């Protein structure tokens, strides 16, 4: 009973709010001594204000078909005029279509408000409705075809969310839209798009409370883009720079969680494996000079990696690196360039 009572109160509150919003300019209410609201002024029956109020009331009562019918007739008679109620009429007509499950067709109504009446109070409301539709589409809602939802609408949803950011830049709605689109790409493993979207979010909303989350997701997206030593490793470079930026911007969180240390070590190992794969290719084509140079560079730049250990083993096997008898550790690797410099110094002395 308590749940039913709460539901009833919420439904009544929503109905009163929607109805009051629609007829606030043409209706007045007074609070009686009994605690009841009494309407003291109502729109004239048959007037434009009355039609808008009736349509709003029908929507609040769940009679979207009736609301759409009376608004459609009114629009047919007034859409080519300069009537001040036109943006409200298109907005209500769009809401009625959404309630009846025709959200794709409602976009034509909302687009009319957004495109033709940007100074109307219904502009932002229409943008919000389009964002809701886009949100539902990227979360799996399909478009109707012959009364059945069979057509995928993901690309439409992405476009609607992008438009939301363009139409209300800097707003809370635009911030939500940007983060939602980035998360959508991340869920679908469209990692390049995800990384770009998280980067755009950080640029557009640098003071947002979600900047840290966006930066971590961007790092993860760039790392996950790396498919192996034989593929493009530019994402690793981007991730490495972002980790350094993250540690500077959020030093306390970096130390507490240790997450960036783990990611940094993984990036170092992946980059080293990529260099090691290059060295193997040089050995395969019998270019030992280049292979030796690449292995030495790997050991110097990524000394704490498994790839560096493997590189040392490869050089020892080819007598390019000599073990120190006392410590049983390899001497510092010497390249042809290093040897040339040493010979020059000896001749000068």
Image (spheres, grey):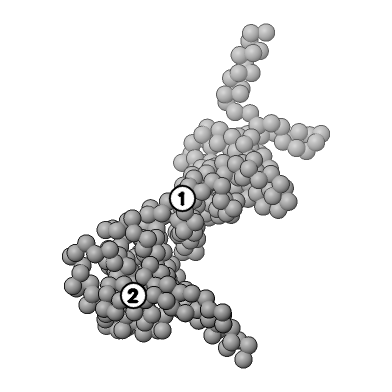
Is residue 159 rendered to the left or right of residue 259?
A: left
Residue ID for mark 1:
170
Q: Give the number of the mark in front: 1 or 2.
A: 2
Residues marked 1 and 2 touching at CB (< 8 Å): no
Rendering quarter of residue 43: bottom left
Residue toward you, 73 or 334: 73
Q: Quadrant of the C terminus?
A: top right
Residue 274 percent coordinates (x, y): 54, 45
- Residue at 69%, 50% in the rendered image: 253
Residue 298 percent coordinates (x, y): 60, 38
- Residue at 57%, 54% in the rendered image: 210
Residue toward you, 133 or 324: 133
Q: Secondary structure at mark 1?
A: loop
Is residue 222 rendered to the left or right of residue 76?
A: right
Compared with 105, 348 (above or below) is above
Residue 75 percent coordinates (x, y): 23, 72
Does residue 293 appear in the picture of this structure?
A: yes
Circle 2 packing at 10 Å, graded few (<14), some (14-19), many (20+), is some
Q: Secondary structure at mark 2?
A: loop
Q: Quadrant of the N terminus?
A: bottom right
The label on residue 43 is 2
């Amino acid at each position: 009973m308590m749940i039913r009572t709460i539901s009833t109160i919420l439904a009544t509150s929503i109905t009163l709010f929607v109805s009051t919003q629609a007829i606030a300019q043409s209706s007045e209410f007074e609070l009686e001594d009994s605690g009841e609201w009494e309407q003291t002024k109502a729109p004239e029956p048959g007037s434009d204000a009355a039609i808008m109020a009736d349509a709003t009331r029908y929507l609040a009562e769940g009679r979207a078909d009736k609301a759409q019918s009376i608004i459609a007739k009114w629009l047919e008679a007034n859409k080519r005029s300069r009537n001040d109620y036109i943006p409200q009429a298109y907005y209500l007509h769009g809401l009625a279509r959404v309630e009846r499950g025709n959200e794709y067709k409602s976009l034509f109504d909302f687009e009319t408000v957004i495109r033709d009446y940007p100074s109307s109070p219904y502009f932002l409301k229409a943008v919000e409705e389009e964002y809701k539709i886009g949100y539902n589409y990227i979360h799996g809602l399909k478009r109707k075809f012959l009364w059945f939802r069979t057509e995928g609408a993901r690309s439409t949803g992405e476009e609607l969310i992008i438009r939301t950011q363009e139409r209300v830049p800097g707003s809370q709605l635009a911030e939500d839209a940007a983060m939602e689109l980035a998360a959508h790409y991340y869920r679908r493993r469209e990692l390049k798009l995800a990384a770009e979207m998280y980067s755009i979010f950080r640029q557009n909303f640098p003071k947002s409370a979600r900047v840290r989350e966006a930066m971590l997701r961007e790092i993860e997206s760039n790392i996950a883009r790396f498919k192996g030593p034989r593929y493009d490793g530019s994402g690793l470079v981007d991730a490495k720079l972002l980790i350094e930026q993250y540690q500077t911007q959020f030093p306390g969180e970096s130390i507490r969680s240790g997450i960036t240390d783990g990611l940094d070590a993984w990036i170092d190992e992946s980059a080293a494996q990529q260099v090691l794969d290059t060295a193997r290719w040089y050995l395969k084509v019998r270019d030992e000079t280049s292979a030796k140079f690449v292995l030495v560079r790997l050991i110097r730049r990524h000394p704490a990696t498994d790839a560096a250990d493997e590189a040392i083993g490869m050089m020892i096997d080819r007598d390019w690196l000599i073990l120190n008898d006392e410590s049983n550790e390899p001497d510092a690797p010497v390249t042809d360039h290093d040897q040339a410099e040493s010979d020059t110094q000896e001749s000068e002395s």
